[in-house]
Amino acid sequence: MGHTGMDADVVIAGAGPTGLMLACELRLAGVDVMVVERLAARTGESRAGGMHSRTLEVLDQRGILDRFLAAGALQPVGHFSGLYLDFDESESRHPYPLMILQSDIERLLEEWAAELGVRVRRSCEVTEVRQDAAGVTVELNTGQATPAPLRARYLVGCDGGRSTVRKLAGIGFPGTEATMTALIGDVELPDLPEDYVWVRRCPAGDYSAIAFEPGWYRVITSEYDRVADRDGPATFEQLRESLIRVAGTDFGMHSPRWVSRFNDAARQAEHYRQGRVLLAGDAAHIHFPAGGQGLNMGVQDAVNLGWKLASVVRGRAPESLLDSYHAERHPVGERVLHNTRAQSALARPGAQTDALREVFGSLMVLDDVNRSLRLMLTALDIRYPADGDHLLAGRRVPDAGLKTADGATRVHELLHAARPVLLDLRGSAEVAALAAGWADRVDLVEARSEDDHWSVPAVGDIPAPGALLVRPDGHVAWAAAADAAPDTGALRTALATWFGPALPG
């Protein structure tokens, strides 16, 4: 039992990657959380197929990255609408995308959630949501007669693009309609030519085949100006017929494991928060899955929201802190919708688009263009609004090597407990004295940087800072240069803004 009279402090609808990641973030902060999931069990469907650098960093920040690396394979290339991107090893300790199936991601996150004590109730479909001044009442359909409703202080909808929570909360979902249909399936493909390149553009559309295990492939066909009924079933025969229309053959495909459909509809919730109801992941945004950004954005939504919601639930920060979730993540979602619309347009068949792709591809060999697209897809360049003019303010903190009294470590290792860190690299007595006022919430770490300069994506190498305040999600709330006295007034403001008032006295 969570808060008095509550079944949990927070109820999360949806046990996909976003919901499970959020549940783990809340548990790390000591919040009682319950996940309700409509499905009786994980489907085992492969679905999304990768994680980008920033998501890998997030998992590293929590000390669980090795589990995911063991289940996937790093690949040194990426793409923008099928046009290859190069990666730069100086921008992250984890510069390359990790090919890993969503089914494995969900399994690993569910195992971690169980270790942390997250309660997951399956075969529970949300049917009604009622808010009041003290909390949220969630009515459920469990297949049993009149199940008891759940009572929580907050409800987070992580229940996908057709989110019931979003609809019940009355949150608008404007955007653009679909202009094409893509079919996706995991199948045996014995007759694929040995010289096949992973994606082929054809007069009727395009198709791709990606090998995940010996003997079977992820096959995707895209046909433009053919919009299927989104409520209709997706079948193996439809996938086979689509591949024949596009490629002229089905390459002998057989033995489907899973078939689904998607399109290029792009929509975003008008508000990520409506009182005590919040949205994350596909419930907050849907888009064409170009560049593999959707799952990654959902996990990063969860990491942005988790510590803020925990601070409010535990009474350490005012409820207004939750408004920063929409302020920071809604623009990120807008940017992803924008670039996936562009990628969808670049994928259309036709001589005009072929010419556009050739020109665009010639620009991508330029370092600045390649870097801009790479950082956008990997989310390494995100900068949230932050006070102060230090180049690190608002950005994700570089994973610099450190020397502490206990030995060598890295910045991201300091975030395993999902607590904010005030990192003092100069041994400043003023910083240490101020930190005492937040000692129950913020970890003060004194260290020395192993490098004189830190690499910051989209900026370049900058002098190592003298001190910085790092939020649990790995973004810098305040930073001070090493060659000047720290502005303790600005630090005090940042501590109070993000982590609530100081301890009495």
Image (cartoon, rainbow, N blue to C red):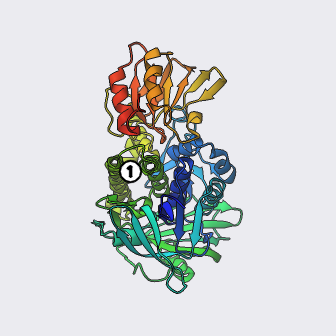
What SS does tag 1 mark? helix
Expressed as whole percent of the image width and height from the top left, the position of residue 34 reads: 53, 63
Is 253 situated left or right of 396 in this image? Answer: right
Camera sees residue 252 = no
In the rendered image, which quarter is residue 450 located in? top right
Q: Residue at x 52, y 69 (%)?
A: 36
Q: Is residue 17 above or below residue 411?
A: below
Residue reaching furthest to the right: 214
CA neighbours of label 1 inside 10 A, class few (<14), some (14 to 19), many (20+): few
Q: Position of residue 304 (x, y in %)?
A: 44, 47
Residue at horizontal 35 percent and vertical 50 percent from the top: 319
**Residue 157 quadrant:** bottom left
Mark 1 sits on what residue? Answer: 358
Amino acid type of the residue that numbered disc 1 sits on in the rendered structure: Glu
Q: Nearer the viewer, residue 496 or 473?
A: 496
At a point 59% along the width and 63% down the height, the residue shown is 119
Residue 314, how many percent across, how many down? 46, 48
Q: Is residue 365 above or below residue 27?
A: above
Q: Nearer the viewer, residue 9 or 270?
A: 9
At x 37%, y 26%, the residue is 491
Which of the 4 quarters of the picture holds residue 333?
bottom left
Q: Quadrant of the N terminus?
A: bottom right
Is residue 164 visible from the viewing direction of this image?
A: yes
State left or right for residue 128 relative to residue 183.
left
